[in-house]
Amino acid sequence: MMKIAVCYNEVPPRLRKGEAADRISEAGSASEAQAVSRVLKALGHESVLVPVGADIATFISALRKEKPTLVFNLCEGFWGDSSKEMHMAALLELLDIPYTGSGPLCLGLTQDKARTKDLLARHQLPTPPYLLVEPGAPCPSSRDHNLAYPLMVKPRSEDASLGITADSIVADAAALAARVTYIHITYRQAALVEEFIDGREINAAIFGNTPAESLPLAEIEFRPGLLHPIVTYDGKWLEESSEYRQTVPVCPALLDTRTEQRIKDVALSAYQLLNCRDYARVDIRLRDGQPYILEINANPDISPDAGLTRAASAAGYSYPQVIASILTMALTRKELTHAQP
C-alpha cells in the first residue's frame, strides 16, 4: 500500500479572465479528483486529496505533512490561471515528488497552441495554417495573410473549449476583427486565427510510454441544428443546452482501416514529438482523408465519463485499470530516476 496525494485545482470565487460560465469546467477538477481517489482506495492505497488554492505555501506545507509516495497530478493551472499548469508540475519536480502525467516543458508547449503548431509544421505533421494576433496589434486584413475564409478564432493558451462559441467561426474581415477583439479583452491573451477545416472531428487518445498505444478513435458527431459543426464551450459543458445535445461523442469512430491508421500514426507522432507522458488526447479534423491536428491535450480529463476513459473502455480497459496503469507508469519512472548508479 502506498500513500498517494491526488492534487487538483480549487476554483477562485471570481475568475481573473474569461466568462463567468467558465467556472463550470474549472470546478470539474474536484469531481475528477474524487473519482480518482475512490479508485485508488479501492486498489488498496491510501489516498489523500490535496487541493491547490490561492496560497501556494499552504499547498507545499500540506504535501510535506502528508509525505506521499507519489502525486496523482490533476492540476490544470493555478487559481484560475491555466497558463500556470506547467508551473505545478515544475513545483513537484523541485519538491522531488514523483507524479503522474507529462512534465513541465510538455505542458507548457501544449498549452501554447501557436508554439505547438510551429513544432508540428516544422516536423511535417499536418495542422491548419494560422496567424497570431497579439493584444494591441491591428487585426490583419485579407491582404496581409494568405488564410482562406472561413476562419476559426480562439484563445492562444486555453483548453476545455474556453472561448469557443458559434461566433468563433468568422466569414469576413469585420467578423474576424470583432472576434479577435473579444479574445483580447475577455481572455487577455493573443488570438489564434486558423483556417477552419470543414470535416469530421476525431479525438485520438494515446496511452502509455514505451511503447505508447493509440486507443480506439472517437468522433464528435454534430447533429442537425448547430450553427457550425464545432465543439463549443456550451456543447462540451452545459448539459441543458441544445449545443450539448447536438454534440455527441461516438467511440469507436466508423472509419476505413487506412484512414484510421493514418490518423493514429499522426496522433502518435505528435504525442512523441511533444514528449507527452502516460496519456494524452490529440484533437484532429479530417477532410478528404487528410487529418489535420488542431491541438494536443497533455494530461486531459480522466473522469469516468471523459473522452480518454471512453476510448480506453473501447480498448477493453476498465476505469480502475486506467487509473492503475497511469499509477504504474509514474512508479516505473520514479524507480528509473531514483535508481542508484
Image: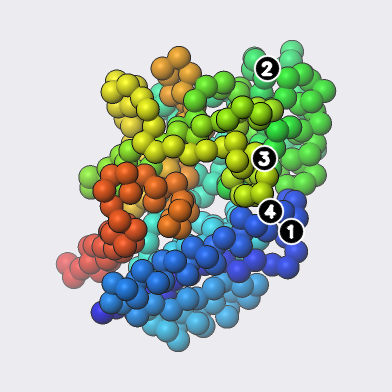
- For mark 3, what is the residue? 242
Residue nearest the observer in this picture, 299 or 107: 299
Foreground mark, 1 or 3, reads: 3
Secondary structure found at label 3: helix
Q: Amino acid at mark 1?
A: Arg
Q: Amino acid at mark 4?
A: Asp
Q: Position of residue 260 (x, y in %)?
A: 33, 27
Secondary structure found at label 4: helix
Q: Residues within 10 Å of mark 1 (few under 14, many from 20)?
A: some
- Is residue 83 in view from this perspective? yes
Foreground mark, 1 or 4, reads: 4
Residue nearest the observer in this picture, 338 or 330: 330
Q: Is residue 139 above or below residue 40?
A: above
- For the residues labelled 4 and 2, the Cα–Cα distance comes to 28 Å
Q: Position of residue 110 (x, y in %)?
A: 50, 44
In the rendered image, the residue lying farthest to the left is 341
Q: Are marks 2 and 1 in contact (CB under 8 Å)?
A: no
- For mark 2, what is the residue? 149
Of the two numbered discs 2 and 1 on the same chain, state the one appearing first in sequence. 1
